[in-house]
Amino acid sequence: MITAFPEVAILKREEAKFLILACDGIWDCMTSQVAVDFVAGRLSKESKCSNIITEMFEKNIAEEIHSSNGIGCDNMTCVIVEFKGSK
């Protein structure tokens, strides 16, 4: 299923520390809140965004190539934008 209606949250600039842009391969495996918690917990430990994305992909990829439900078998694309001065 494809949607043209993204999930949008409006925050004050001071409240936003990062932005996650990802394809459905990620959102099929994680809710928005789970993804935010996953990234926030790792950013607080000063991990590089590229390392966090790698961990996210490894967490979400199906263990078997022929997964019966297809979850974790889709392509996965993700960008984390960390806002300057947010740490």
Image: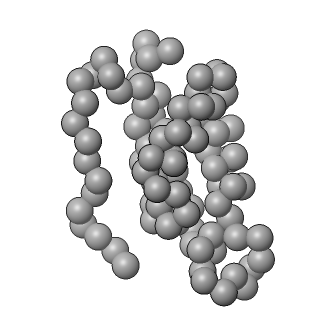
Would you place residue 56 above or below residue 26 in this image?
A: above
Q: Is residue 12 left or right of residue 32?
A: left
Which residue occupies the foreground of this view, 14 or 49? Answer: 14
Q: Is residue 17 left or right of residue 3?
A: right
Which residue occupies the foreground of this view, 68 or 77? Answer: 68
Q: Residue furthest right?
A: 64
Q: Position of residue 70 (x, y in %)?
A: 60, 80
The residue shown at (43%, 51%) is: 32
Quarter of the image where the N terminus is located: bottom left
The colour scheme is: one colour
Q: Position of residue 36 (x, y in %)?
A: 48, 41
Q: Position of residue 56 (x, y in %)?
A: 63, 50
Q: Is residue 22 left or right of residue 63?
A: left
The residue shown at (33%, 22%) is: 15
The residue shown at (66%, 27%) is: 47
Would you place residue 68 above or below residue 30 in this image?
A: below
Q: How many marks?
A: 0
Which residue occupies the foreground of this view, 72 or 21? Answer: 72
Which residue occupies the foreground of this view, 41 or 81? Answer: 41
Q: Position of residue 22 (x, y in %)?
A: 46, 54
The residue shown at (66%, 22%) is: 45
